[in-house]
Structures are given as C-alpha cells and as structure tokens.
Image (spheres, rainbow, N blue to C red):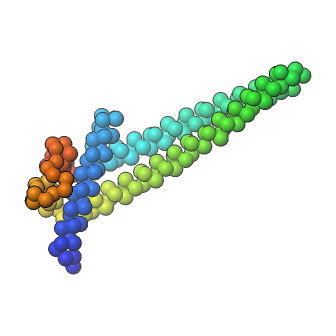
Amino acid sequence: MIAPEEEKLLKTYLVEMFGQISSMRRELAALQGDNSSFASMTDTLDAIVENTEAAGNTILESMEAISASVGKLQGAKDPATAAVCDEIVDSTNKVFEACAFQDLTGQRITRVVKSLKFMEEHINRLVRIWGKEELARMAAELSAPSTPSLLNGPQRTGVAISQDDIDKLFT
C-alpha cells in the first residue's frame, strides 16, 4: 500500500507530466496544425527520419555520380586538370563523411519516438488507475495557490495547466 503523501506526490508528478505533454502537443500542433495525440507527434518524427534518409540518399547518389565523372577526368595528362580533380575528390569525400548525420539523426529520433511511446503508455495506465475525476481534482488543487510562500507565484494564463488540457487527456 502506498502512503497518502507518496500517492499525492505520484499524482502531482502525473499531472505535471501531462502538462509537459500538453505543451509539447501545442508546439507540434503549431508546426503541423494537429494536436490530437502522441501518435501524431511520433508520426511527425518518423516522417523527419524518412525525409532525412531520402535527402541523404539523394546527396550520396549525386556525390557518387560526381566522383565517377571526376574519375574519367583523372586520366588527363594536364597537371592543372589533375590538381582540380584531386580537389574535387577531397571535397566529395568530405561530403560523404558529413552524410553520416542522416544515420545519427535517425537513430536519435527513433530513441525519442520510443521514449514518447513509453511515456504515453505509462501515463495512460496511471490515468486509468486513479481515474479522471481524481486527477482533475488534483490538477485543480495544484493550480490553486495554497500558500503565499509559493516560489513560482501565481502563474500566467497559458502557463498553468488548464482544465481544458486535463479534460483532453480523458477524451
């Protein structure tokens, strides 16, 4: 059995996490025009990975074509042409190395997507355990200043967790 003060702390964390998730949803909604769910956030991140991969592949294919063309020129007897070919080869090699960003970006975004899905699953489980009425009461309790000694003071409209945000969690 959880002690009442521990339960209150857990509920407080849950409400705070919901507030953060709502904030992330609003930010992504501003980018894509939809704030319906975590699924839309993870879909957005998955699309970023796909688009980055496609762009990276296009860059690599183009650089390979340039390298092939330079290879044809490297047999030239003119020393100036050979020097320019060497410069182009050096530059194309740098582009190949820089294209590693795509793979790293994909790996990092995939980790973020997994973390978002994990959080969503666990937050939804906690919501089911405690119920929306209890959490709505807790959110109202948290947003109402209980003592004048609050370090953050009263929060501005739009900063504090609104009742609409709490209601959206349960719809």
Q: In the rendered image, which quarter is residue 54 located in?
A: top right
| Of the pair 157 and 60, the residue shown nearer to us | 157
| Of the pair 24 and 48, the residue shown nearer to us | 24
Going 18% across and 49% down the picture, which residue do you hit? 161
Q: Quadrant of the N terminus?
A: bottom left
| Of the pair 86 and 46, the residue shown nearer to us | 86
In this rendering, does residue 138 appear at all?
yes
In this rendering, does residue 167 appear at all?
no
Going 26% across and 47% down the picture, which residue do you hit? 22
Q: Position of residue 80 (x, y in %)?
A: 83, 21
Q: Is residue 153 above or below residue 48?
A: below
Total numbered labels placed on residues in the image: 0
| Of the pair 85 and 22, the residue shown nearer to us | 85
Relative to 50, is 12 on the left or the right?
A: left
Q: Is residue 76 above or below residue 105?
A: above
Q: Is residue 82 above or below residue 110?
A: above
Q: Position of residue 45 (x, y in %)?
A: 42, 43
Q: Which residue is farthest bottom? A: 1
Q: Position of residue 135 (x, y in %)?
A: 16, 60
Relative to 33, is 69 on the left or the right?
A: right
Q: In the rendered image, which quarter is residue 96 located in?
A: top right
Q: Which residue is farthest right? A: 77
